[in-house]
């Protein structure tokens, strides 16, 4: 059999070694040189990241505009120069809902040191009656509202939300106590 294949190959003018060779790879076009390939991949990755960043900023906008989100604090500090304290309890949050605000965060009380930490644990109905204001600028969102939390003290909650990073800063100002500042993130409630 081998003899027959060899004779057939000689008659056709093809060597057995040539029969075993594979097709050569097609020549690369100039656009496929390694440097240009890297440049094309870099541009694609940049476009993907830009699209993801725009999607994230749209998410922040939509969450804020629904009046249906929660603030998850990661740390807090009494102003002007109190000690920064980390928050690891996942139960602490401020929930903004269309018909109420749910507040559960640690808070400093006291007029002079040593300040005590207490838990602000309130549900306040009807945000529209709390002078709820939100406005957007080129950096993100500013949201504020006021409530007395069922006491004689007036509390002003001021959120500053960075549109690009999602970082949220909350200042709770009071008529009688120092301002307490929180940093964290926001998430939609649904």
Image: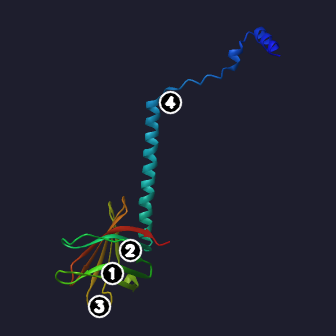
Q: Residues within 10 Å of mark 4 (few under 14, many from 20)?
A: few
Give the colour scheme of this rendering: rainbow
Instruction: Give 131 or 41, whichever is nearer the viewer.
Output: 41
- Whichever of callouts 4 and 1 sits on the residue coming sooner in the sequence is 4
* Badge number at residue 89: 2
User: The N terminus appears in which quarter of the rendering?
Assistant: top right
Q: For mark 4, what is the residue?
A: 32
Residue 81 image offset from top left, x and y in percent: 18, 71
Point out the frontmost of discs 1 and 2. Answer: 2
Q: Residue at x 46, y 48 (%)?
A: 48
Q: Residue at x 43, y 50 (%)?
A: 49
Point out the frontmost of discs 3 and 2. Answer: 2
The Cα–Cα distance between marks 3 and 4, rounded to whole angstroms, is 71 Å
Determine whether the residue tagged by mark 1 lies in a helix, strand or loop.
Answer: loop
Residue occupying the far left of the picture: 112
The Cα–Cα distance between marks 1 and 3, rounded to whole angstroms, is 17 Å
Is label 1 in contact with label 2 (beta carbons under 8 Å)?
A: no
Q: For mark 1, what is the residue?
A: 131
Determine whether the residue tagged by mark 2 lies in a helix, strand or loop.
Answer: loop
The Cα–Cα distance between marks 3 and 2, rounded to whole angstroms, is 26 Å
The Cα–Cα distance between marks 4 and 1, rounded to whole angstroms, is 61 Å
Q: For mark 3, what is the residue?
A: 151
């Amino acid at each position: 059999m081998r003899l027959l294949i060899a004779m057939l190959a000689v008659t056709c003018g093809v060597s057995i070694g040539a029969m075993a060779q594979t097709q050569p790879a097609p020549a690369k076009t100039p656009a496929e040189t390694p440097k240009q390939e890297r440049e094309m991949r870099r541009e694609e990755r940049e476009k993907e990241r830009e699209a993801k960043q725009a999607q994230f900023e749209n998410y922040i906008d939509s969450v804020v505009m629904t009046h249906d989100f929660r603030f998850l604090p990661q740390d807090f500090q009494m102003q002007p120069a109190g000690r920064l304290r980390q928050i690891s309890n996942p139960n602490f949050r401020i929930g903004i809902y269309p018909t109420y605000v749910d507040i559960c965060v640690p808070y400093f009380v006291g007029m002079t040191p040593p300040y005590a930490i207490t838990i602000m644990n309130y549900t306040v109905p009807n945000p529209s009656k709390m002078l709820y204001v939100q406005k957007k600028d080129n950096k993100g969102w500013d949201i504020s509202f006021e409530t007395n939390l069922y006491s004689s003290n007036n509390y002003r909650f001021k959120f500053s939300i960075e549109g690009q990073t999602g970082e949220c800063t909350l200042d709770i100002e009071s008529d009688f106590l120092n301002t307490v500042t929180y940093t964290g993130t926001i998430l939609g409630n649904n």
